[in-house]
Image: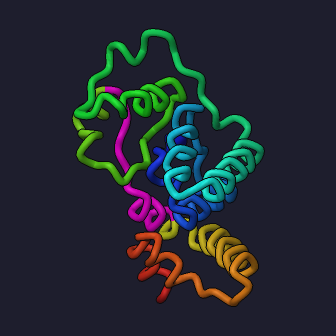
Amino acid sequence: MKLTLDACVLFPTVMREVLLAVAGQGLFVPIWSDRIMGEWQRAAARYGAASEGEALAAIARAQDLFPKARVAPQPGLEARLHLPDDNDIHILATAIAGNADAIVTLNAKDFPRGTLASEGLTRRDPDGLLWELWSHHPEAVEAALERVRATASRLDGEEKTIKPLLKRAKLTRLARAIAG
């Protein structure tokens, strides 16, 4: 399954790390464009130079981990597409150009299901997607979550538990599922 990741699911650190860790387990193939990565960088820059620097490092790491994720724009494709917010058309164009199955986004209102269906796409919210992947592949998702938890603990210098991390990242359905 190929999934285009919107910048709004890449910028929150834990959400991004969980999505990429699950992709690293082979449960889906991530897709993005340079423009999507630029949106992530600009969102981080609003929090200062340190956040922008962290975003640039994370973008480079993501691109190293998934070198085939980057999709180049197709000339003329965006001109034929329509969404409620013209600023999101490039995301739809990336999904089409990359032969994605869905767009993973928190922005439901600007990605109408009918419009996406006419292009052979669906819209997935990250929590529902991750819960579904966990329900079919619990060991793989839990291994990914353990890596995210261990990294967060190392970076913060204190032991973290995964459930509160997931809840803060608005991955509440997944948090409830793994809690037993």
Q: Residue 76, image x and y in percent?
A: 43, 10
Residue stretch in magenta: 119-133
Which residue ends up furthest to the top in the rendered image?
76
Residue at x-position 67% and y-position 76%: 152
Residue at x-position 27% and y-position 24%: 82
Quadrant of the image occupied by residue 33: top right
Q: Residue 45, image x and y in percent?
A: 55, 50
Residue at x-position 63% and y-position 53%: 49
From the viewer's perspective, is 21 left or right of 173?
right
Q: Residue 51, image x and y in percent?
A: 61, 58
Comparing 135 with 53, the one in front is: 53
| Image color mode | rainbow
Residue at x-position 51% and y-position 69%: 134
Q: Residue 129, image x and y in percent?
A: 44, 59
From the viewer's perspective, is 112 left or right of 49?
left
162 in magenta = no
